[in-house]
Amino acid sequence: MALSMKHSSIILFFASTLFLQVALGEITCENLPTNVCSFSISSSGKRCLLENSANEDGKLEYQCKTSEVIVANIAEYIETDECINSCGVDRNSVGISSDSLLEPQFTAKLCSPSCYRNCPNVVDLYFNLAAGEGVYLPDLCSKLRSSPHRAMIELLSSGAAATDASAPIASEDIIVGAPDISPASF
């Protein structure tokens, strides 16, 4: 009898622990610290984005907000420092914008094997931003390997530079769900 009571207590303990982990593990963008907001994905699968506004004193305040951009097949995710560094992205990025695709150094890092093969969250985001500019990211990365200068000229002539690149892309303009990025596809 004492043995089964002990087993019941252990089972109840593990069930309670699991419930507590699930309850506390939910990611809500508005509850994230601003230093991990950018490139995070909420439990609902929506991208988090860093926004700024001036307070009463005129100083900029930063807040993490939930965007309307839904990420296919990824939820409850905070991007790793390794991917932030490998891909050349900045955790202090405000909003979601395709501006950085026009910078050759950034695009080279994004298309590098260490980013492209290992950081599906960042690649998915920029795949969709590039698509919004009429550019297919896998083709751009392939061209960068063979002819970096020509690839950037083609990117600039695609119309990406003709749009208001300083304005964040509206969530309804983003195509959700990049293709499965695997080492074989690079």
Image (cartoon, rainbow, N blue to C red):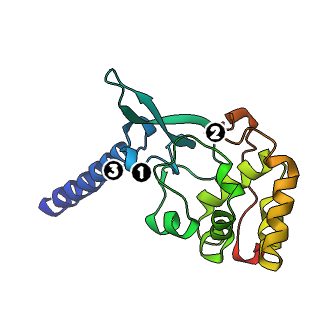
Helix, strand or loop at label 3? It is helix
Q: Is residue 65 left or right of residue 33?
A: right
Q: Is residue 141 above or below residue 50?
A: below
- Which residue in the protein does label 1 denote? 36
In the rendered view, tell whether residue 133 sits above or below residue 156: above
Give percent across and percent down for residue 8.
23, 55
Toward which corner of the image does residue 140 lie, by quadrant? Answer: bottom right
Q: Is residue 177 visible?
A: no
Q: Rounded to the nearest whole Å, what is the CA distance between mark 2 and mark 3?
A: 26 Å
In this rendered view, identify the residue nearer to me: 87 or 45: 87
Few, some or many C-alpha atoms within 10 Å of disc 2 (few <14, some 14-19, many ≥20)? Answer: many
Amino acid on which disc 2 is placed: Val
Q: Position of residue 170 (x, y in %)?
A: 68, 33
State which mark lies toward you, 3 or 1.
1
Task: Report the quarter where the N terminus lies.
Answer: bottom left
From the image, tell me which residue sits under label 2: 69
Q: Nearer the viewer, residue 87 or 70?
A: 87
Q: Residue, x 52% and y 42% (percent of image)? A: 94
| Residue at the disc numbered 3 | 21
User: Mark 2 or mark 1: which comes first in sequence?
Assistant: 1
